[in-house]
Image (cartoon, rainbow, N blue to C red):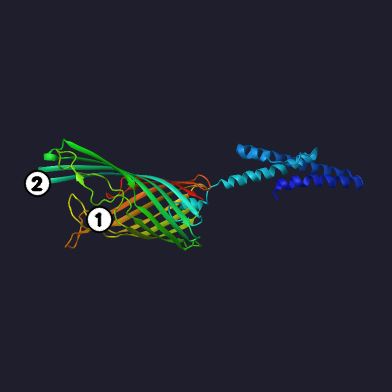
């Protein structure tokens, strides 16, 4: 029992026993003075505790206070018992307000920090609405000629630039079949806009041609499962094995016709439409680890991206205008970082992620596999994230990634809202 409620409950009993003792025992001046002093001290402490409770109630939000005031209670007592009964009535109101605040609190600090970095198994159903914006800015300078006298270039100069925005709106679902097994599904809708700029027709760098292409369609759907191999205990981290499969439901990049928007500049050729998917089935097994060391959460993952080869009617009208078989380069995923818990609602994180892909290969009828020059890539990005629990069920997760290599987007900004049922 709390000290305030103990003192409030003991005061009436103490006064009752004191009255009986004074009525039955012979009067003693010293004993009577001591008892009166104890009563005054007890009354003073009760009044002080009552004032502290009143101050605490004044700091509480108005709604819990109004709800507590509306709750029925016994009528106030008269005389000295009123002072003792007031704290006993205020204590349940204070406890109720704390329960209301706890019910609105976020998930545990470890859950908040781990959100977005590792699969979660403690909930049955999670729906996530997300938005992301990825920006590319690529410049290319092509020289066709020779250098005379080690100072003068004679030939054609072609300057090309591509600026692209890729916005993705996705709805993801995760359903926990058990405490260690969860299924997930992701449906994206992709809006792409690319601006193509080119200069250098007939050795001129003053005339610049520009064209813009926009396309919006459903992206590649992803579904898979996460299984927790080891639960975190002691110095052992959480170890989770994941398998994701991506279906080519978006607009395929193969067979898209290329046109020349400016008749005066043959250097500028743009696609009629933009792809919203990779055009092939992708299988992505991975293993992730997570370890909590209050207030830090460490996480990391390693995975392999396997692209299934497929036959296409037209590989690329601009270079290979004919049927063939395409095998996008497989890749290795590596990532890791840490999150710092700021309080019971918020955490910040820093991470680095990389995807290292081999070159794409094509095989024409009657020929062997040939690598596509320049198709191998090394994509590495540095990310900064913020997770904030808006309530028990809803979390805000934001991530900003900056590209560290030429094969990586300049930046990628994503905002997600996981809702836990």
> Is residue 52 at least partly visible in the picture?
no
**Residue extending farthest left:** 149
Is 102 left or right of 196, judged from the image as shown?
A: right
Q: Residue at x 65, y 40 (%)?
A: 67
Left or right position of 223 against 65 = left
N-term mark: 2 or 1? 2
Q: Determine the secondary structure under disc 1.
A: loop
Tell me where residue 131 appears, x and y as whole percent: 39, 45
- Give the farthest residue toward the top: 206
Q: Which residue is mark 1?
A: 376
Q: Which residue is mark 2?
A: 146
The quadrant in which residue 184 appears is bottom left
Q: What is the distance, in whole Å, between disc 2 and disc 1 at their CAs? A: 28 Å
12 above or below 362? above
Question: Picture coordinates of residue 416 (x, y %)?
Answer: 43, 46
Q: How dense is the environment of label 1, judged by Cα within 10 Å: few (below 14), some, or many (20 and up)?
A: some
How many C-alpha atoms fall within 10 Å of the one at disc 2: few (<14), some, or many (≥20)? few
Between residue 70 and residue 309, name the one nearer to us.
309
Q: 135 or 270, which lies in front?
A: 270
Q: Is 380 on the left-hand or right-hand side of 236?
A: left
Query: Left or right: where does residue 277 sit relative to residue 95?
Result: left
Name the residue at 35% across, 49% down.
382
């Amino acid at each position: 029992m709390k000290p305030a409620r103990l003192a409030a409950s003991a005061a009436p009993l103490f006064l009752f026993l004191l009255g009986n003792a004074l009525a039955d025992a012979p009067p003693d001046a010293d004993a009577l003075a001591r008892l009166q002093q104890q009563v005054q001290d007890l009354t003073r402490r009760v009044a002080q505790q009552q004032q502290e409770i009143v101050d605490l109630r004044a700091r509480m939000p108005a709604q819990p206070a109004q709800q507590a005031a509306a709750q029925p209670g016994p009528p106030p007592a008269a005389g000295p018992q009123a002072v003792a009964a007031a704290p006993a009535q205020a204590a349940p109101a204070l406890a109720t307000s704390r329960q209301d605040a706890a019910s609105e609190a976020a998930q545990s600090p470890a859950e908040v920090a781990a959100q977005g970095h590792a699969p979660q198994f403690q909930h049955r159903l999670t729906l996530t609405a997300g938005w992301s914006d990825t920006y590319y800015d690529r410049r290319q300078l092509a020289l066709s000629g020779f250098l005379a006298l080690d100072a003068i270039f004679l030939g054609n100069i072609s300057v090309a630039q591509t600026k692209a925005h890729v916005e993705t709106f996705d709805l993801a679902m995760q359903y926990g079949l058990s405490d260690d097994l969860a299924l997930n599904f992701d449906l994206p809708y992709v809006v792409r806009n690319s601006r193509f700029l080119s200069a250098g027709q007939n050795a001129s760098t003053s005339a610049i041609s520009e064209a813009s292409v926009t396309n919006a369609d459903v992206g590649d759907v992803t579904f898979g499962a996460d299984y927790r191999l080891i639960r975190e205990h002691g110095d052992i981290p959480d170890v989770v094995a994941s398998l994701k499969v991506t279906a080519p439901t978006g607009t395929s990049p193969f067979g898209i016709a290329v046109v020349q928007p400016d008749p005066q500049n043959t250097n500028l050729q743009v696609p009629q439409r933009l792809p919203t998917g990779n055009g092939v089935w992708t299988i992505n097994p991975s293993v992730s680890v997570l370890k909590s060391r209050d207030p830090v959460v460490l996480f990391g993952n390693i995975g392999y991206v396997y692209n299934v080869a497929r036959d296409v009617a037209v590989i690329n009208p601009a270079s290979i205008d004919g049927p063939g078989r395409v095998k996008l380069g497989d890749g290795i995923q590596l990532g890791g970082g840490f999150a710092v818990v700021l309080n019971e609602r918020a955490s910040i994180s820093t991470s680095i992620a990389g995807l290292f892909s081999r070159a794409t290969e094509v095989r024409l009828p009657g020929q062997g596999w040939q690598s596509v020059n320049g198709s191998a890539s090394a994509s590495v990005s540095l990310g900064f994230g913020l997770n904030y629990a808006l309530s028990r069920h809803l979390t805000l997760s934001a991530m900003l990634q900056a590209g560290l290599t030429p094969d990586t987007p300049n930046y990628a900004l994503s905002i997600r809202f996981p809702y836990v049922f």
